Image (cartoon, rainbow, N blue to C red):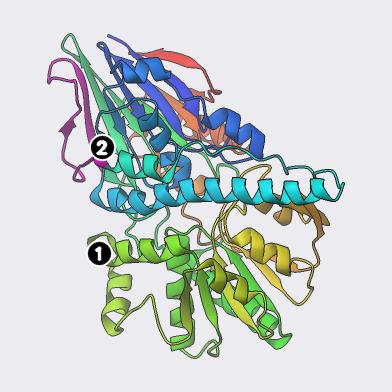
Amino acid sequence: MGIRLHFWGADQTVTGSSHHIETAGQNILLDCGLFQGRRQDAADINSHLALTPEQLAGGMLNAVVLSHAHIDHSGDLPLLSKQGYRGPIYTTPATIDLCAPMLKDAAHIQESDAEFIDKRRGRRKAIGVPPGPGAIPVPPLYSQQDAEQVNQLFKPVKLHEPQLLAGSTKDAGFTMTSSNAGHMLGSTCVLIEAVEKGQTVRLLFSGDVGRKNLPIIKDPDPAPAADYLIMESTYGDRLHSPVGDVKQKLATLIKAVLARGGHIIVPAFAVERTQQLILLLHELIDSKQLQEFPIFVDSPLAVAVTDVFKKHTEEWDADACAFYNKHEDAFGWNRLRYIQTVQESKALNGLHMPFLVISASGMLEAGRILHHLKNGIEDPRNLILITGYQAENTLGSKLIAKLPEVNIFGEPMRVRAQVESIDALSGHADQQELLDWMAPTAPGLKKVFLVHGEPVAQQALKAKIEERYKLEVVIPKRGDRVEIS
């Protein structure tokens, strides 16, 4: 028998996760994520799915398995449905609850950014000024209605319980078994067992592997036994700072900005990172390590997501549960305010006092964070605090690279604000953590495929895996097809 793998996303890059798998006439998709990068490149890549609209409408795709809710793994699902897919999307209950607001928000951001850039382009044209680079409007991939429609396709699965996928039988097709990935609320690694003519091949998809001792979520489960492994490699070339160091660094940076009267602008993913930061800030103020000062969460999505976190306490670790039980609301207190409307968001830019604002998107590619950045990036009193991975060519990656000037909404802006980063909160395992995570399954593996990483990180991790485990490691590129047995 053979399993045919078609690598379609997050191949030699960290966004747009999507892998098409076929056996015994059955087809499944592992993840269906949005590629994030240069505006026009992203639009071109995201509009072309692993299967054509004709194949989707014809029922060729039997099932989708979703590892977790992050948009680079789930964000193209509404387009999949829009182009004709009507089968099930298997994932955890927490992921289902997260995807409902996240996918609708992704559609809203696409619509809003296209409208904003189109209006700005029109104003510049009216006064005879040519549009700046990056100022070309990109039509939304899908609407908020499309995002709501795909919610009907989700099918919940429990961790560690085998699930026969649609179109399959126990004698031919696919069975999935999920385990906790420790990356974010509801995140999973997925073992796919493909059966054909009495033979079984076990393919393990890591999803995004998390770290031990991250705030709120439980530690990753050990990797189960498998024949082949598709593994992420985001931080395959580096080691993180210890998680325990993050609170002290956060407190030190904030104190310095408060002393000089500046603003702290924190781009953060609305899911997981925002909740982790809120909890850490609450702990710092609760323990008197920080004075009370205004803190804003400027993301309607973060409000909805925080409600999902409160609903799924079964996903929390013991420390988060203990802190939550000590407070009426660990994610909200007197000095914290959640911003809902555009008018409230704009009003923050007129505040002449120190404050901290957490806003999406985490890679500074879209959303309200761009407006805060535009208003604060040229003030040297301010701090831009990067708290997560920044994909190549994103605005966040350019800030970390300390470029003296960046484009925001197509206009050049001088970077005069302080830029710092904290990687200890990363939801991605580093090189050593990935090697340790795969240790239980390594003895039985025939081959490893590295995805979800930049080429430099992948080459470094490939060398370490080959050295430590003596395994064959392949780094596929988008469009590669491989048969395994």
Q: Magenta segment range?
A: 152-178
Structural crowding at the residue carrying mark 1, measured as other residues with C-alpha within 10 Å and reported as few (<14), some (14–19) or many (≥20): few
**48 in magenta:** no
Query: Residue at 30% across / 15% down in the picture?
Result: 58
The residue positioned farthest toward the right in the image shown = 128
Q: Nearer the viewer, mark 1 or mark 2?
A: 2
Q: Which residue is mark 2?
A: 153
Residue 362 image position (x, y, % from top left):
56, 56
Q: Is residue 298 above or below residue 255?
A: above
Front residue of 44 and 66: 44
Q: Which residue is mark 1?
A: 311
**176 in magenta:** yes
270 sits to left or right of 41: left
Q: Is residue 331 above or below residue 28?
A: below
Residue 223 image position (x, y, % from top left):
32, 40
What secondary structure is found at the residue carrying circle 1?
A: helix
- Mark 1 and mark 2 residues within 8 Å of each other at the beta carbon: no
